[in-house]
Image: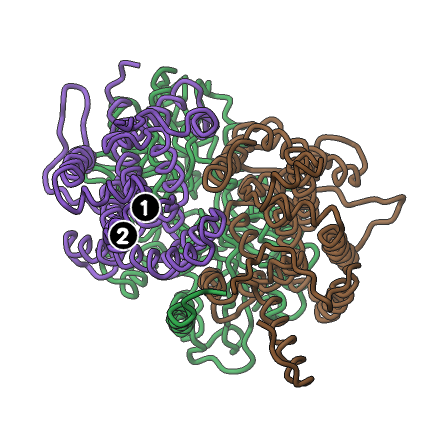
Amino acid sequence: MAISRGTTARLAAGLAVLVLAAAGCGGKNGGDEPTDGTAKGEPIIIGMDEDSTGPGASYSTIAGKTIRLAVQDINDKGGVLGRPLRLVVENDESDPTKVPATLQKLQSQGAKILLLQSGSAAIMQAKSVLSQIGLPAIAPTGVTATLVDPPNNELIYMLANTTADWSKVYCGAFEAANVKRLGVLTDDTATIAALNKALLGEMDCVEVVATEKGATNASDLSAQVARLKNAKPDAVLVTSVGGAFEVLAQNTLAAQMKDTLRFSLASIGNQPDSWKLANPGALEGLVFMGSLSTDNPRTRELIDFLKEKNGKDYEVTAYDAQAWDAVQLVKLAIEKAGGPDDPKKLNEAIQSIKGYQPTFGQPSFTISFSAEKHLGADGLCGLTLIEFGADNRPKGPWPTYQPPCEG
Amino acid sequence: MTDLQLWLSAVEMGCFFGMLALAYHLIYVGAGFFNFAIGPYAMMGGLCTSWLVITYDLGVWTAATISVIVTLILAIVTELGVVRPVQKRSGSGELPALVAVAAVLFAIQQLAGYVFGYPTLPGQSLATFGPVTIGDVTIQPSSVLMIVIAVVTFVVTAFWIRFTRTGRLLRAVGDSNHAAALLGLPVNRIRLIAFLVAGFIAALAGILFAPKAGVHSLSGLAWSLSGFLAMVVGGTGSVWAPLLGGMLLGLVEVFLPYYFGGQAHVYGMLVIALIFFAFKPQGLFVRTVRA
Amino acid sequence: MTVKTSTVQLRRSEPRSGLGGLILGAIAALLILLWVGSNGYKQTLVMSAVTYALIALGMYVPYLMAGSLSMAYSAYAGIGGYAVGLISTKTGLPMVVAWIIGPIVAAVLAVVLGLVTSRLSGFFLAAVTLLFGMAFTAFLIDAESITGGSGGLGNLRPLNLLGWTPTPYQMMVISVIIVCLTAFLLDRMRLSPWGVIVRTMRDAPRAVEAAGVRVPVLNLVALAIGAAIAAVGGALFTYTAGSITPETFTLNVVFLAIFMPLIGGSGTPWGAVAGAVIAVELTLNFPALETSGTLLLALGVLIILLVAPHGVIGYADKLRTRLWASLRKEPHGG
């Protein structure tokens, strides 16, 4: 029993008020869900697993925002089969152990088809859960090849070129730049662990002389970069989900290995918020795997639309484009199936999509699915290598090498 | 071992840990326990500043001032609202105070996550000058600031403890709480002052360190542990002891992964903790009492 | 008159056998199982509560009975989980073996850690064991060839007990039964003469030594049992989740595990279980407060620390005795 019961009771009351105030202020994170627009009728429920607070948040929030804009746009134009699309969102924080609960919750809220906007390790875990709950799913920004490999791959689809294609492009780039020894700087997320295995496993065109791993929340990477330097690589590849880690990595590399050629994945190149966080000039010369080309008319349309909605300073990234296309593909599939309620028909409808022209990649790039092909990209034309300029912004296509594009 | 860049990183981290350890030291001397919430105080300083600058477009100095005030409020609440009642109630028992301070640590982290969000926010540099180049090495302005202000903080604190009345009262209370109370010294006021000064130093450290690699709501736990370890390693013998402890830890953080790769610094911290806690809990600097 | 919470109180109404707690716990468990039905999402909630409860019960043994707060429990739960993962992916042994090997390894590790830290207490012990938990996570990430590195282990085999594979619902029922059994056994232990000795050890170690009981050995036994229980919880969670990564059992879990007995009531092991249920409800299931549920929990813990140190069960119990007393028109004892 507390001696000064009076004061502690008063303090407790104060704390309780704080708690209630916190509860009252709650929900600030849940706003911005799309409305039904001009569509009427029973809503078609789409479930989105969006990692908004975990390691994948740096790219998932970009895609998530555009998914919402796409849904709103469809609803404003009359919806799908006259019915509005309704988005229900859960968050698995890219943690494979939270995935079963997240997907189950989405299904219990009536979702008929899922968008998996999370880390690849989490999506890997999702595959077995999908078989249990029987819903088809699209992973808009997934790039790890093993995500669409068996087992349990009947219900999952991806849009963009995967690591299998990336390794071809990187190998072409390394050959063109005469890179024989590669150093890799990686983070410790489950997502990148899965991606590294898939990507580096395929790249036998180059010798990986050193792989250094840093904690995602590391305050300092100078030790890792010093070790990389000692291995004397011809180039360094940074494989990370982006965010603060990659900014630190690029800063440290620019400071300690100024003259070494640097490559990155699609991460920092597609996270405009990170560009100004890097030290001045630290990103100059960095080559990343991009997917946007302004030669593509649909890309230009999307850029105009997003600049109108998000302000004219908005930088459109591959994540935006893939997110947009994922929603359009969902609409297409529901229309082809005549309705969302039969998951098997919906699944077959996705597989019947051929020759869809996306808002990313070269103008001739298309996306097609089939029963055996769950990876949409038709050919390598979805990828371009883009170089950063001295102002820490993407300058343009890397002059040394570009993936070959057939017609 | 001659790589200047690595030494620079080590010194910068050492200064950060040293400031955290100083905050621990002050509260240990003034209130007699280890305030594990120091890490979250530092986190609050850094994260609140970043959030205010990013969300409300405030100037860096305004945001920093507000953050420091917020942290000081948290420090006061910790002392008056949690630690003092719990210590009064359970007397000399260590465990209730430990659980209470763990609850405070946890609560501050969750509060920060709720208000500021969970993604890592970039630190805001207080410096307005450009990077400094010495030979082959470029030093970022935030690093310069961190090192300089850390040293200044220690100098000012040493002066304060030795030459001002409050500082000497603090030392007296630290030497013997009981005797101080008997002598009629304002023990409770001293405790509060210790908390305030420690909170200020911690918040400042957080603001200075955040530009290095960003800050997020969960950064505080690792910082708490590092600060505690640095304090114990340094010992309580002198005001400068925490800085020494911090520097040692900074070397561990940078050079162990350099030589052994991977997460060697985490193993190193564990080994150092085991060694020092078990064999030399008084640390490297032991105060000798003149008979 | 100050009544220290740690003194042994013989309440006339408290049955020595711990059956009262078991009956109440069993009723609550039954209600929860009925509420779940076949809802997959609710099943995962219950499994989370089961895991938290077992980790909290694991921490309960050395903390509340011997007064030492070890924060290494994320490591012990992780050992249980990785036992399931490793046995499934690297060996052909039947999966049941994981529930035997995992707890044993965790217990051995707890004993080693206990020996190394035997001279430490309070803040120092907490700090070292926290660092140990972090070092364990770092080890899981570094030792890629054994543990699968940051990607962890996935695609686990189903359990096969002599040809019978439990459904997820059955697995959940088994887990709840395990929790109830563990809480009951710990309760019996607490009320038994041995339990009295262990609790006295916390307050008057010399008296216990004088009675001929070796305090350090008891300490290690308590730590070993606690670690084993936590490992069982980790194994159950990993099995039902189907995968494990180094990030699965974070230090967050450890903090929650400290607070759960506080919330539920530290007088009985069932408090840890009650606290686990409350914690899961607040952090995972509160609809309007998705991300602030944990904050509410943290603030709630502070309030309870200051106002109702006996937790929810203690408060309910106090209300019950007051009600009883006022019904019988007896003077309320101080």
Q: Amino acid at mark 1?
A: Asn
Mark 2 element type? helix
* In the image: residue A130, left or right of residue C286: right
Specify the quadrant of the image occupied by residue A148. Answer: top right
Asked whether residue A396 appears in the rendered view, the answer is: no
Q: How is the rendered protein coloured?
A: by chain
State yes or no: discs 1 and 2 in contact (Cβ < 8 Å).
yes
Q: Which residue is mark 1?
A: B177
Asked whether residue A337 appears in the rendered view, the answer is: yes
User: Which numbered circle lies on residue B187?
Assistant: 2
* In the image: residue B271, left or right of residue C112: left
Q: Nearer the viewer, residue A328 or C93?
A: C93
Q: Colour of chain A?
A: green
Q: Colour of chain B?
A: purple
Which of the two discs, 1 and 2, labels the residue nearer the N terminus? 1
Q: Nearer the viewer, residue C309 or A213?
A: C309
Chain designation of label 1:
B
Q: Residue C228 at x, y = what percent?
A: 69, 41
Q: Residue B182 at x, y = what percent?
A: 29, 50
- Measured in 3D between alpha carbons, the distance from the residue under mark 1 to the one under mark 2, in whole angstroms, is 8 Å
